[in-house]
Amino acid sequence: MYNAFFGFRENPFNLSPDPSFLYRSPQHEEALANLIYGVHGRKGFIVLTGEVGTGKTTLLECLRDELDAHGIEFAYLFNSRINPQQFFEMIAYDLNLQCDRRSKTEVLFALNHMLIEEANAGRTTVLIVDEAHNLEWDVLEEIRLLTNLENPKLGKLLQIILSGQPELDRKLEAPELRQLKQRIVLRCTLAPLTLAETTEYIRTRLHRAGMTEMKVFPPEVLREIHLRSQGIPRIVNSLCDNLLLTAFALETKVTSVEMLDEVCLDMRLSWPGMPRHFRAKITPSQEPAWGPPSEG
């Protein structure tokens, strides 16, 4: 709606994961490099964790682009609330295994055959599971058993990447999963952005969308965006998108802290240290589960 008004080629703060808008902070660069290295190096088992909205799925989208570019077969499971039978069905579907996909035995035979063929051709195969913190114990055990698919000369035949919220790390610490934990070769963690990173993140997205100078967000607004979002990219996107919409409605090309106050009220957003009078306007029943926790 506001793209033409601000001269954007596309929406700079779309909430959908888009690899072309990836802000390559040092931690994101390191995490992506580890994922790519882990796959090409046949490391076997990799874990990526981070709070909600820190960019895990966007990194996975970048990894998928990398795999496509190198002709590497992969299965991508985005729905992790599944049982073991559904788990194997989804793998068989994504990898187009020619077998009875309702039979775990047949899926495993077909998968092993495919993995050996790919390895003999000098390629590897990847299993990516997003939202892995939701996986049940029995599915995690099946994943552990898949790490046994290896060859003395070819190494690990299947590279497995689990991505999830910090609950995944805590789940992997459980005594029942100690064998799975021992197989983790690489761990990557995404933390919230710093103030400098939040500023550069916004600048990068604006520039990518066609705005060469970041005059729309003054320094005081940028500081407040970082404070209220707690450096979570997804919330930064929501705040900036709503701010641009508000500025468009008011026919101004510069946002203000007052506009941000209005946006935060509309979003029912709370943040640590928010003023008491502001908190009073947001009743406890209105505070969203996904927003940063407020301090009492």
Image (cartoon, grey):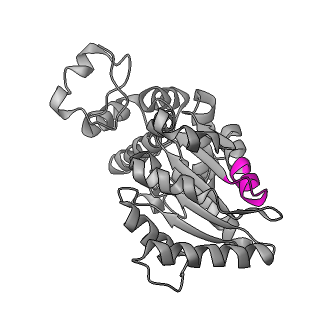
Question: Which quarter of the rendered picture does the N terminus lie within?
Answer: bottom left
Picture quarter containing residue 182? top right
Coordinates of residue 132 in the picture (x, y in percent) = 46, 50
State the predominant SS element of the stretch in magenta. Answer: helix
Question: What's the magenta region?
Answer: 33-44
Coordinates of residue 257 in the picture (x, y in percent) = 40, 29
Picture quarter containing residue 156? bottom right
Can you say whether 209 is above or below 56 in the image? Answer: below
Q: Residue furthest bottom?
A: 98
Taking the image as drawn, is residue 258 in sight? Answer: yes
Q: Residue at x 58, y 56 (%)?
A: 60
209 vs 293, nearest the viewer: 293
Picture quarter containing residue 110? bottom right
Taking the image as drawn, is residue 51 in sight? Answer: no
Is 34 one of the magenta-colored residues? yes
63 vs 187, nearest the viewer: 187
Coordinates of residue 63 in the picture (x, y in percent) = 64, 60
Coordinates of residue 129 in the picture (x, y in percent) = 51, 57
Question: Which quarter of the rendered picture does the C terminus lie within?
Answer: top left
Position of residue 15 in the picture relative to residue 218 (left or right): left
Q: Residue furthest right?
A: 153
Can you say whether 122 is above or below 276 in the image? Answer: below
93 vs 52, nearest the viewer: 93
Q: Residue at x 51, y 41 (%)?
A: 54
Can you say whether 19 is above or below 192 in the image? Answer: below
